[in-house]
Image (cartoon, grey):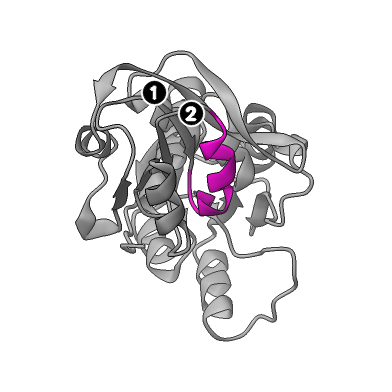
Amino acid sequence: MKLNDLEKELFRRLMIDEYPFDISMNGLQVAPNEEKDIKKVAVSVDACQATIDEAAAKGADMLFVHHGLFWGSPLSLRGSHLARVRKLIESDMALFACHLPLDAHPALGNNAQMALALGIREYDPFCSYKGKYIGFKGKLPMAMNTSEISSLLGFSTNWGLRVLPFGKEMIESVAIVSGSGGDDLDQAMNADVDCYITGEIGHVAYHTCLEEKFNVIAGGHYQTEVFGVRAVGRMLEKALGIETFFIDRRTGL
């Protein structure tokens, strides 16, 4: 598939046009050759130098990431930013980024994929942001404790997991927002659920959760955002016949 055709397909499938307020430059951020045939795609969370280098070394025609290189403000091409762009161009490798649309997508998104990993088959929209819901909430197939939920999602204290286990020991319902969803704690506490699953939670939330007897599982920003890029990789292989591979560059944050 030609790069410009793949771009259109990803915009359609990921409903990117529905998020004009996202400060990420969703879509193609670097495109050395828009007519290039895309046969192999690397998927990863971050467009860091190590990820770009590995994708190039393994012959990727395109790198698909959740966190790209441009975030609403122009950056001069110098230092590490220049090095990343230079490597992409020298490797004739495109960079495609998908931020909020990949958190919120009802099937391929980080939050939907976490819900599915927990066995939740019917989930409702949760957490309004600029008029769009970006998370989901639902009932677990069986009551679980925080350790069981964390294990099912692949969260580990070695890679950023923090738990505030102040609510019901056996959890029956959850709300989910990946990444820096700690700012949306108030919406979770008003959502009639037993536990909030997110990436990061701040110090100021501790006593509120303790006093309100509410559970929070903060799996780490990175660890909650591997789900979407992996799902996109599976979609590219099954629906479009494009070879993909996942690059894991954990930060522990």
Type of amino acid under label 2: Ala
Q: Badge 1: how crowded within 10 Å, few (<14), some, or many (20+)?
A: some
Q: Pick whichever, 52 or 106, lies toward us.
A: 106
Rendered position, 56 above or below 80: above
Residue drawn at x 41%, y 49% as measured from the top left: 211
Q: Residue at x 49, y 49 (%)?
A: 61
Name the spot of residue 134 as percent of width and height, x first. 61, 37
Whether residue 172 is in magenta: the answer is: no
Q: Which residue is mark 1?
A: 116
Q: Return the residue at label 2.
A: 112
Asked where in the image residue 207 lies, by quadrant, the reply is bottom left
Labels 2 & 1 near each other (Cβ < 8 A): yes
Q: Is residue 20 left or right of residue 155?
A: right
Task: Answer few, some or many: residues within 10 Å of disc 2's Cα (few below 14, many 20 plus, some between 14 and 19).
Answer: many
Residue 83 in picture, x, y percent from top left: 52, 78
The image position of residue 68, as x and y in percent, is 57, 59
| CA–CA distance in space, label 2 to label 1 | 6 Å
